[in-house]
Image (spheres, coloured by chain):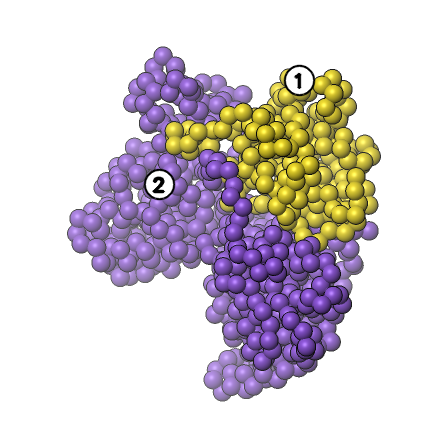
Amino acid sequence: MKTSRPVSVVISGVGGQGVVLAARVLSAAALASGLEVKASEVHGMAQRGGSVLAQVRFGRKVFSPLIPFGGADYLLALEEMEALRYLDLVGKKGLVLLYPHRVVPSSVTLGQAVYPGGVEEELAAAGRRVISAARLGSSALANPRRANVVLLGLLSRELDFKPAVWKKALAVSVPPGSFGENWKLFSSARNYVDNSGEL
Amino acid sequence: MSVLLSGNEAVARGAWESGAVLGVGYPGTPSSEILPAFHRLGGVRAQWCVNEKVALEVAAGASWAGGRILVTMKHVGLNVAADPLFTLAYTGVKGGLVIAVADDPGMHSSQNEQDSRHFARAARVPLLEPADGQEARDFARLAFSLSEEFDLPVILRLCTRLSHSRTPVRRGRRRQPARELKFVRDPAKYVMIPAYARRRRKSLDERLERLARRAEVLDCNRLEKGGDRAIVTSGLAYQYCREVAPDASYFKLGLIYPLPEKKLRDFCRGRKVTVIEELDPYLEHEIKAMGLKVKGKPPSFRAGELNPDRVRKILAGRPDRAPSARPLPPRPPVLCPGCSHRGVYVVLKKLKLVVTGDIGCYTLGALAPLESLDTCLCMGAAIGHLEGLRVLLPAGEREKVVAVIGDSTFVHSGITGLVDLVYNGVGGVVIILDNHTTAMTGRQHHPATGRSLAGEPASRLDLEQICRAAGVKRVAVISAYDAAGLESFLRESLALPEPSVLIARAPCSLLFKGPITSVHRVEAELCRACGLCLRCGCPALIRLPDGKVAIDPAVCRGCSVCAGLCPFDAIVETEGE
């Protein structure tokens, strides 16, 4: 991990999916690792089922909480179409962590628009590296409400934060009753052995 | 050790450390989280007021008793509080009084993009603008001490990106609040009759002159030596500048009103200076008015939120154009599954009414597929719009107009509109969408919920009684899910010359935390794929490839609004999780 310039992470999804929670866990882990952190969240009207974007930046020194176009190192997409919406923020060498789940917007339900097909292929065609949580198998996909934790588990493989730091960051961010399930999902994503040779 | 705090939490922390004893305000994104955070710090009183004007008046009284007071609101709230604000600059304070005002560049959750800095100059009230959480905490402390030293209320200007960004903050201990709280009579200071106001106006000039001299030596106005490129900036704009022009020389302003004129002259002397600021060219014009030659941003950059890319373009003299993004189906915010407003809008749409609207979640009724809200201007305006339209529209048209207003908004500034409607004999139907909360801003309590900010029991404002007291004789309370009841009351009332109030009541679906015992499902063999149910715009409804509809049982809340729309009785109740 480079520390000369900040590491920038975009987290996108739909209001109610836990985008803000994911940003808080990541921010807490970065702060506990001794880095400066700036994390931008969206509240208010944007949370009513709309498209939601959080941006987390950490490093020795961070100025802007907003990531410039092409400046993100990682995109965590909790919803397929919301991966495409913020793709411009991701650098050419950026990595997209995708949770294969669709939340159909009303414009599509009403037949006024078409939900894009082949999102993973389109991301790859745009030159970005993509890791879909589909590789983790059905247990990771069983509960789309935990997409945030699954993707954080995948992201944790890329960052050199200690496991104990992640564990504590998660513990202080989720309700105590659900920590066990969340930690299990996080750990299996973090520790899964990939046979595709791409990770 | 630093902790991660949102800008809002950092303001609360700074006020708490300053020994503030009372926090007052009205919720409004992006300012809503300040008061609850202040309350959680403990040992203080925090309360929601009915609106921002009342909040500032409460704060003034409490300050005159000698305590330090925090007031919070969003930018448009300052319009509501403007009346007390302008004269509060004359009277001044006793205990420090700080008004945290959150602007919303980009209009993430607002009806306009006004720049609160103009209020500081117009009302002649000092304004500080922090650039991150640490400064939000530090400047809150500075604001309290300046307020007391210069006998003025002080505005702390926040913006969405500061309020809702989490950054590391070093904390300090709480200063002991003033021991003796006492009101000392001083009519020449507190009674603004013309004779005294003229004296206080002169005093205001003197106080501001003293503060302007202090501005020259305050640490919050900071010089950062660098290369030839020179930038004057403040707030979040400073962070964007540092990101894209790390080698420039900076004059970062913390105190925006009054400005440190001498220091600005020194900084600008003999070099080309660019002024980078969020929203209006406020600093640019003020600095130019000093006779200094500086360059501001082109007019196209005044609208919308700044970010590193836009700042880079301003500095490079490039046009304000966003890269062309791939076209995608839009995903605007929608009413939640089970929302109590949805059924009301279905009825209003069926009756083809003109609906004057207001500020809240229900403003989303303007969007497809409900498309049944026709106006939205400001808090409480729906009832005034109804009155104005009914006064001028011809018979046959005027009977088609109704107003919708939420319970919290009605208490904020709808009551006066209702009194006016009755007093002027105009008639019409006002629908109060009573979901027992201030939903859009995060479900805060208000007088009609009967709970305080802390969630403790409080006196409950009786909406029916207050409407009757305003002179409305026809007041009905009908469940927001009772489509037939809503429709028949509206049909009976619309043509009447006298006013009616329909309280459409059902709690916000987000208030219900228990298990959902009954949901709905579609009997596939009965569904004729007509799509009529989709017109209620519920996120639980899914259109299948064959055109038929299914209901996502994990999303459905069992409200039955969609079932009421199905002409084939294909939507039936079933057991929940």
Output the chain of dot 1.
Answer: A
> Would you call the spot at circle 2 few (<14 residues within 10 Å), some (14-19), or many (20 or more)?
some
Q: Position of residue A94 (x, y in %)?
A: 68, 36
Q: Which mark is residue B104?
A: none
Q: Which residue is farthest top?
A: B525
Image-based side of B87 in relation to B484, left or right: right
Q: Which chain is yellow?
A: A
Evaluate if marks 1 and 2 touch, with contact meaning CB atoms under 8 Å apart: no
Look at mark 1 in the image and give the residue it sits on: A137
Colour that chain B carries in the picture: purple
Instruction: Tell me the quarter of the picture where residue A132 sits.
Output: top right
The nearer-to-camera label among 1 and 2 is 1
Q: Residue at x 66, y 30 (%)?
A: A129
Which residue reaches farthest left?
B395
Q: Amino acid at mark 2?
A: Glu
Residue plotted at (76% across, 39% down): A29
Report whether residue B12 is seen: no
Question: Badge 2 sits on which subunit?
Answer: B
Whether labels 1 and 2 belong to a single chain: the reply is no
Marks 1 and 2 sit apart, C-alpha to C-alpha, by: 42 Å
Question: What is the quadrant of residue B253 in the picture?
Answer: bottom right
Could you say whether the residue bearing mark 2 is in a helix, strand or loop? loop
The foreground one among A101 and A178 is: A101
As displayed, is residue A58 above or below residue A199?
A: below
Whole-percent x, y for residue B95 in the image: 66, 71
Q: Which residue does the image show at 68% across and 77% down from the upper left? A: B270
- Which residue position holds label 2? B371
Can you say whether B352 is above or below B128 in the image?
above
Q: Residue at x 57, y 76 (%)?
A: B288
**Residue B208 seen in the figure:** yes
